[in-house]
Image: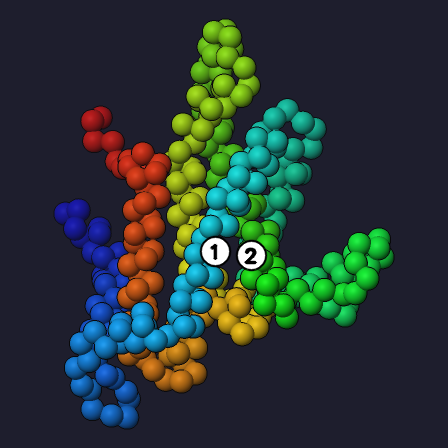
Amino acid sequence: MIWLFLAPSLVIFILYRIIPLGWNAVLSVEYWSPFKPTRFAGLAHYQEMFTYDDVFWQSLWNTVLFIASAPVAIAIALGLALLVNSRISGREIYRTILFSSYPMMAVAVGIIWRWLYDEKVGLINFILLKVGVIDKAIPFLNSFQLALPAVIVAALWQIVGFFMIILLTGLQNIPRNLYEAAAIDGAGPLQQFRRITLPLLRPSIFLCMVIGIINSFTSFDLVYVMTSGGPSHATELLITYIYRVAFSISKFDYAAAMTMVLFLFLLVLTWASNRASGGEAGAVDTTQ
């Protein structure tokens, strides 16, 4: 009987997840074109990817840097969650303001930050010039060194509020009597944070980390609006490069091979995050 209730979700999952993934796996070992007969390619696409494609390695490295920004976002969000969880006046207003960036569409966020970074009319350059920090406007999005950090800052600004809400929920679920008992035993605020707060926040931190990893792999809209992967692939992510290869030069088979690498990379990172959080994140308690 339970399968009848699961059937609609399973059908959708199979149709939109399993079958496309299987088709990608098949396509990645073929020479496929809508205008030519299909031929078996073996591991030729993977060999080209790992051996000759410098843009692939650049986009992979950029994606890794994007992922590395997730712990920074979590640390900032944790600090904000601790702040708005304390007894300060107007904390509900602060929560709303901090969370307000997350529901915005990535395209809107990209447009806002592209204007902020603009070399001629951007607010950031205007302020820096006015206070005398710089003598000449900084081309944030046209600089090979600054473009990726600039995009990462925009992504962090959007996601931090969401992480704060997740961590705030975790903080509010920690029993207060644990802190009271620790205080009676002489534990200070730092010891309480290390021995109580962080261990009990592991599931929430793991969830934030997984969302951060997925966000790093799916930040297509933000990157495409702000830089389109430029300058000189400085902000090219795997997802934007896959799109460019598939729909700009119509190499769907090669794009499928990169998609498989992206999937395996995401799988390994998620597993590693789960192990780092104790290996029990998302587990169901069957003892009750």
| Vertical position of residue 102 compared to residue 126: above or below | above
From this viewpoint, which residue is outermost toward the bottom? 35
Amino acid at pointer 2: Ile
Residue at image mark 1: 65
Are dots 2 and 1 in contact, CB under 8 Å?
yes
Quarter holding the C terminus is top left
Task: Determine which residue is flagged by label 2.
Answer: 152
Asked whether residue 182 appears in the rendered view, the answer is: yes
Question: Callout 1: 10 Å neighbours few (<14), some, many (20+)?
Answer: some
Q: Amino acid at mark 1?
A: Leu
* Crowd class of label 2 (few under 14; some 14 to 19; many from 20; radius 10 Å): many
Residue 69: x percent and y percent? 50, 50
Q: Residue at x 34, y 56 (%)?
A: 266
Q: Is residue 115 visible?
A: no
Rendered location of residue 247, percent (x, y):
41, 81
Q: Secondary structure at mark 2?
A: helix
Q: Nearer the viewer, mark 2 or mark 1?
A: 1
Q: Quadrant of residue 208?
A: top left
Tell me the residue at 40%/85% (across/down).
249
Q: For the view shown, which residue lies furthest in the front direction? A: 51
Q: Position of residue 161 (x, y in %)?
A: 56, 45
Lower sequence index among marks 2 and 1: 1
Q: Please give the name of the residue rendered at 66% of the width and 38% of the height, measured from the top-left corner.
A: 94
The residue sitting at 59% across, 63% down in the picture is 145
65 shown above or below 108: above
Q: Give coordinates of residue 243: x percent, y percent.
A: 41, 74
Q: Which type of secondary structure does the marked residue at label 1 adopt?
A: helix
- Residue 228 image-quadrant placement: bottom right
User: Image height check: is 272 above or below 87?
Assistant: below
